[in-house]
Image (cartoon, grey):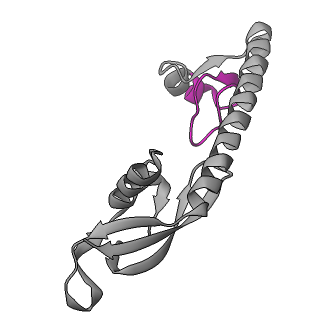
């Protein structure tokens, strides 16, 4: 059964995609939840318009992410943390702490879930953290953990 997605669905596709799915999946799950509509001639034209607007928005967001990536990569971010002797922290520096430090330093709000941190930072000094600003734009940011 042919459908057009009205919203992004992780396992299927993005808004405006024209797909072939099982009839039961379309009738019992996608359509009642407002995630898709049955494909007709008029709806297919509407889907093409959705895809065009999605592509324009995606291009604009990618360009914005690239300029932000250049801004973030240019200077290290300092994160203050309480530390004891030998440079060991009394806690750890998490993705939320890094996001707050980036917002305080550069005025750019970064979602903590976009910061990939294998494990929290537990020592003073530099560390490199990868931030996903867009699906195509990832930037490595230098984090300097300093004693406060």
User: Front-most of 62 and 80?
Assistant: 80
Q: Position of residue 37 (x, y in %)?
A: 62, 17
* Residue at 59%, 43% in the rendered image: 11
Vertical comparison of 139 with 84: above or below: above
Q: Nearer the viewer, residue 50 or 109?
A: 109
Is 62 on the left-hand or right-hand side of 131? right
Residue at left offset 74%, top offset 26%: 51
Residue toward you, 37 or 115 = 115
Quarter of image, res 91: bottom left
When the figure is inspected, residue 17 is found, relative to residue 45, above or below; the finding is: below
Region of the chain picked out in magenta, as a range? 1-26
Residue 19 part of the magenta-drawn span: yes
Does the magenta portion include 134? Answer: no
Q: Quadrant of the N terminus?
A: top right
At horizontal 74% and vertical 13% (from top left) the residue drawn is 46
Residue that extends furthest to the bottom in the rendered view of this protein: 86
- Left or right: 15 with respect to 43? left
Q: Residue furthest top?
A: 42
Q: Quadrant of residue 41?
A: top right
Q: Position of residue 138 (x, y in %)?
A: 62, 58
**In this view, 133 is above or below 127:** above
Residue 19 visible here: no
Q: How many marks?
A: 0
């Amino acid at each position: 059964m042919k459908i057009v997605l009205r919203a992004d669905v992780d396992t299927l596709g993005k808004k405006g995609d024209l797909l072939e799915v099982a009839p039961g999946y379309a009738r019992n799950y996608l359509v009642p939840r407002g995630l898709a509509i049955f494909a007709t001639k008029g709806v297919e034209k509407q889907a093409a318009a959705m895809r065009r607007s999605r592509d324009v928005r995606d291009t604009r967001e990618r360009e914005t992410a690239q300029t932000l990536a250049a801004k973030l990569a240019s200077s290290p971010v300092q994160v203050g943390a309480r530390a004891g002797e030998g440079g060991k922290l009394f806690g750890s520096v998490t993705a939320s702490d890094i996001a707050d430090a980036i917002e305080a330093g550069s005025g750019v709000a970064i979602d903590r879930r976009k910061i990939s941190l294998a494990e929290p930072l537990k020592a003073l000094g530099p560390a490199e953290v990868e931030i996903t600003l867009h699906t195509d734009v990832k930037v490595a940011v230098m984090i300097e953990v300093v004693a406060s």
